[in-house]
């Protein structure tokens, strides 16, 4: 019976109602039905983008630039002899949405070095056509069996 202290006293001890014709809804589904009413919809994406970290592009010293040029020259000489050396390049990719970017690494067989476009062109997976192109000006490191001795 309701009283002055608890107006729900008559129903508080009744068993919880469960529909016999419907399966129990998960907590995730129950929460999802209220998502259209989120006051700050889209705000999660803004916060995630703001919190996403980017790297700054490192400027190479003159000696590092010279070493990269020597490695590229050696690679080009080997290509001219009809071989496709396997190398790994570390290069900077600018972020399209904010300042900075990230460093990526790519390993493959070099098809050619384009001096006018200033790119390193790798062989595609089929081994015949041009694959990935990496801008030489964004390369910070070149590694591989052919050129690793030059780092010593």
Image (cartoon, rainbow, N blue to C red):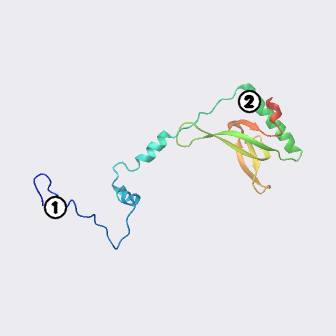
Tell me residue 7's x, y (percent). Answer: 14, 56
Residue visible at 40% across and 61% down in the picture: 26
Of the pair 7 and 138, the residue shown nearer to us: 7
Q: Secondary structure at mark 1?
A: loop
Tell me residue 57's x, y (percent). Answer: 62, 33
The CA span between labels 2 and 1 is 84 Å
Question: Residue 74 occupies which quadrant of the picture?
Answer: top right
Q: Upstream in the sequence, badge 2 or badge 1?
A: 1
Question: Residue 104 occupies which quadrant of the picture?
Answer: top right
Of the pair 28 and 119, the residue shown nearer to us: 28
Residue visible at 26% across and 64% down in the picture: 15
Tell me residue 17's x, y (percent). Answer: 28, 66
- Farthest residue, direction left: 4
Of the pair 93 and 151, the residue shown nearer to us: 151
Tell me residue 113's x, y (percent). Answer: 78, 43
Q: Tag on residue 65?
A: 2
Q: Number of marks in the image? A: 2
Callout 1: few (<14), some (14-19), or many (20+) C-alpha neighbours within 10 Å? few
The quarter of the image holding the N terminus is bottom left
**Residue 29, placed above or below residue 150:** below
To which residue does mark 1 refer?
10
Callout 2: few (<14), some (14-19), or many (20+) C-alpha neighbours within 10 Å? some
From the image, state whether disc 2 or disc 1 is nearer to you.
1
User: Is 120 situated left or right of 15 in this image?
Assistant: right
The quarter of the image holding the C terminus is top right
Question: Residue 118 occupies which quadrant of the picture?
Answer: top right
User: Is 47 situated left or right of 94 in this image?
Assistant: left
Residue visible at 31% across and 67% down in the picture: 18
Q: Tag on residue 46?
A: none
Q: Secondary structure at mark 2?
A: helix
**Residue 11, placed above or below residue 72:** below
């Amino acid at each position: 019976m309701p009283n002055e202290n608890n107006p729900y006293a008559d129903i508080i001890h009744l068993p919880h109602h469960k529909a016999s014709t419907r399966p129990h809804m998960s907590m995730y589904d129950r929460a999802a039905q209220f998502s259209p009413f989120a006051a700050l919809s889209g705000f999660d994406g803004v916060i995630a983008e703001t919190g996403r970290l980017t790297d700054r592009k490192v400027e190479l010293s003159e000696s590092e630039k010279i070493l990269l040029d020597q490695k590229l020259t050696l690679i080009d000489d080997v290509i001219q002899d009809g071989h496709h050396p396997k190398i790994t390049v570390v290069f900077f990719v600018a972020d399209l949405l904010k300042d900075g970017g990230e460093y990526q690494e790519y390993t493959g067989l070099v098809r050619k070095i384009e001096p006018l476009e200033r790119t390193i062109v790798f062989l595609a997976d089929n081994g015949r056509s041009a694959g990935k192109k990496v801008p030489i000006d964004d390369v910070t490191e070149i590694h591989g069996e052919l050129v690793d001795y030059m780092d010593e």
